[in-house]
Image (cartoon, rainbow, N blue to C red):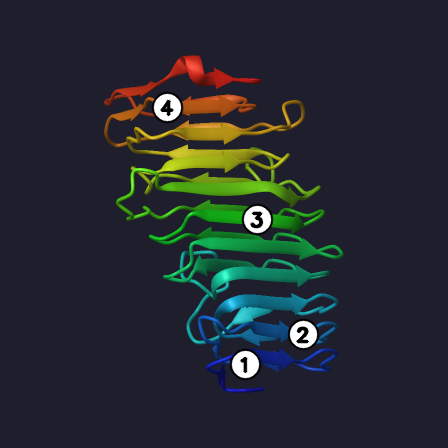
């Protein structure tokens, strides 16, 4: 048990093979420092505060207890970050269940890589990844295997003034054999806050929802290479008129428009693939 760890450099907590509950407060490294927590094969609960650093690694593979959080941070996915990383977050678990992680890009992050791996029968793992105002890319890779796992990516509005501002969300390297449940997508990408940057989204081979609710006159390209076994949805649900003049959809099976009082328009000639 520790009350927390803070360093101007790297921080490492090694509690592998712990025979009882692991309890730690907030663990914080410098913006250029890495934070590594290893709790492999822990018998009891792994109770942590927030994790903050450049590259953040949490390895709880082989642990049999749940991962919970202290310091009034809930392990329910609610937009309050348990993990804040500048460059990367890597999570590895094997037999854990019902964990929720909010992962936020630090204020000066431009490119965030998230790796999510299950080495065994982890189920019902839920992840939310939030970008920031400087974000240019969020890449999610790994293999969550079976269970009812889900991943949500939420873009912030890139506040740069360059007309070439762009954002990339790449989920194409994320594997899972799981389903999120009948009628529920395995991944959701929210583009709602981004109104003035070009956006590219590459989806997984599972069921993906891409949601947008505001005008954007920049190029929006959404691509899914799996056109046979998944059910992807491009969801336009707005409270005001939405105009997308440079939209390209490929391999997206369903377009949902849920607005009876406002005008929604897209460039239909740019829609291709299985739709």
At a point 28% along the width and 26% down the height, the residue shown is 242
As measured in the structure, the alpha-carbon distance from the residue carrying label 4 to the one carrying label 3 is 25 Å
Instruction: Answer whether residue 119 is visible to the viewer in this image.
Output: yes
Q: Earlier in the sequence, mark 2 or mark 3?
A: 2
**Measured Cα–Cα span from mark 2 to mark 3:** 23 Å
Element class at badge 1: loop
Instruction: Look at mark 2 in the image and give the residue it sits on.
Output: 39
Instruction: Give the image location of residue 166, x and y in percent.
Output: 39, 40
Q: Position of residue 50 (x, y in %)?
A: 47, 72
Q: How far apart are the two marked residues, 1 and 2, measured between alpha carbons?
A: 11 Å
Crowd band around label 2 with a 10 angstrom C-alpha radius: few (<14), some (14–19), many (20+): many
Left or right of 78 in this view: 93? right
In the image, taking residue 251 as reference, residue 236 lies left or right, namely left
The mark that comes first in sequence, 4 or 3, is 3
**Viewer-proximal residue, 3 or 74?**
3
- Dot 1 corresponds to which residue? 24
> Is residue 190 left or right of 238 when viewed as pictured?
right
Disc 2 is placed on an element classified as: loop
For the residues labelled 4 and 2, say whether their Cβ atoms are less than 8 Å apart. no
Which of the two residues, 167 or 152, is positioned nearer the viewer here? Answer: 167
Identify residue for label 3: 140
Residue at 29% across, 33% down: 214
Distance from the alpha carbon under mark 3 to that under mark 1: 27 Å
222 up-or-down from 22: above or below? above
Tell which tag, 1 or 4, sits nearer the viewer: 4
- Earlier residue among tags 4 and 2: 2
Q: Nearer the viewer, mark 2 or mark 3?
A: 3
Please name the residue shown 64% across and 28% down the image: 226
Disc 4, SS: loop
Would you name the residue on which mark 4 appears? Answer: 246
């Amino acid at each position: 048990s520790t009350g927390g760890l803070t360093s101007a450099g790297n921080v490492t907590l090694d509690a592998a093979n712990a025979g009882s509950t692991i309890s730690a407060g907030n663990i914080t490294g410098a913006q250029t420092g890495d934070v590594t927590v290893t709790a492999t094969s822990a018998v009891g609960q792994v109770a942590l505060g927030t994790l903050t650093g450049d590259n953040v690694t949490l390895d709880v593979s082989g642990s049999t207890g749940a991962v919970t959080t202290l310091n009034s941070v809930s392990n329910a996915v609610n937009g309050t970050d348990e993990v804040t990383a500048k460059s990367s977050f890597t999570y590895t678990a094997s037999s854990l269940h019902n964990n929720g992680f909010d992962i936020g890009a630090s204020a000066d992050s431009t490119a965030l890589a998230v790796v999510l791996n299950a080495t065994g029968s982890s189920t019902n793992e839920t992840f939310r990844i939030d970008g920031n105002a400087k974000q240019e890319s969020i890449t999610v890779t790994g293999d969550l295997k079976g269970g009812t796992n889900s991943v949500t990516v939420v873009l912030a509005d890139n506040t740069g003034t360059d007309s070439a501002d762009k954002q990339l969300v790449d989920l194409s390297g994320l594997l899972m054999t799981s389903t999120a449940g009948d009628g529920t997508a395995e991944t959701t990408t929210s583009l709602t806050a981004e109104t003035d940057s070009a956006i590219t989204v590459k989806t997984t081979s599972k069921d993906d929802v891409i949601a947008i609710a505001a005008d954007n006159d920049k190029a929006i390209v959404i691509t899914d290479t799996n056109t046979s076994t998944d059910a992807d949805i491009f969801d336009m649900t707005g409270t005001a008129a939405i105009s997308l003049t440079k939209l390209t959809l490929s391999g997206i099976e369903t377009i949902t428009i849920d607005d009876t009082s406002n005008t929604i328009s897209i460039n239909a000639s740019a829609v291709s693939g299985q739709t």
